[in-house]
Image: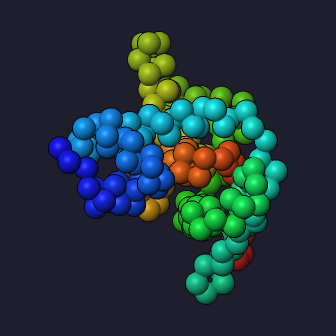
Amino acid sequence: MAIDAKMIKDLREETGFGVMDCKRALEEAKGDLNKARALLKQRGDEIVATKSGRVAREGIIASYVHTGGKIGVLVEINCETDFVARNEIFQAFARDICLQVTASNPTYLSRTEVPAAVIEEQKQMVATLSEGKPAAILEKIQAGKLEEFFKSCVLLDQPFVKEPELSIQAYLDQTLARLGEKIAIRRFIRWELGG
């Protein structure tokens, strides 16, 4: 199949990868858009893996005050260079994270921040409600309830409010792959009037 400029442009707009990356992916996939998307996703995953050890010291502090001034959010997003910090994609990502924190009110940034006592408390609640169940079934119920708990109160595990099929971690990885640089959500704070 012939690869034309429109195919490259459409794939670039959809994935955020550069023109040459999209062209190479389409050539490798012999014009098959689905295969080209899969190749670019694989490349994105590889980029994420290679960037994980890097240090992100630049970035921005983004803010959002919800209509009416009842909720305010500050988020620190880090990247490797000030060039990326000024990038439109990076800025949009920071705004989206502010909106996420406003809408979903997470308590923790990542699972590692959740105290062991809180996790144990969640397990005990399930054990109390599931009294009399066999141990193997209780473990599965606890694991499922813990996943629900993480999705409700851990920012990186929450479904992205603009695209619920995508977690915030997946959105972060997507943005990292698009920009080709390590990006990290360092911290956030949310204020609610009277809260």
**Image position, residue 169 (x, y; %):** 55, 44
> Looking at the image, how many numbered discs can be counted on the residues?
0
Q: How is the image coloured?
A: rainbow
| Residue at the image point whose x is 45% and y is 46% from the top | 21
- Does residue 136 sit above or below 22 in this rendering? above
On the rendered structure, is 166 left or right of 93?
A: left
Q: Could you tell me which residue is drawn at 76 percent across and 55 percent down?
A: 81
Residue 167 seen in the current view: no
Name the residue furthest top.
Answer: 135
| Horizontal side of residue 185 vs 162, given as left or right | right
Q: Where the C terminus falls, by quadrant?
A: bottom right
**Relative to 98, does residue 111 appear above or below in the rendering?**
above
In the drawing, does residue 9 fall left or right of residue 148?
left
Q: Residue at x 57, y 63 (%)?
A: 89
Judging depth in this view, the residue of 9 and 164 nearest the camera is 9
The front one of 101 and 42 is: 42
Q: Looking at the rendering, which quadrant does residue 50 occupy? A: top right
Residue for point 75% across, 50% down: 80
Work out which quarter of the rendered image holds the N terminus and state it: top left
Q: Residue furthest bottom?
A: 68
Q: Is residue 159 above or below residue 84?
A: above
Using the image, determine if residue 56 lies above or below residue 135.
below
Query: In the rendering, at what x and y percent does residue 44 appear?
Result: 50, 40
Horizontal and vertical percent position of residue 62? 71, 68
Could you tell me residue 188's position as x and y percent? 72, 58
> Which residue sits furthest right?
57
Q: Nearer the viewer, residue 111 or 46?
A: 46
Residue 95 in view in this figure: yes
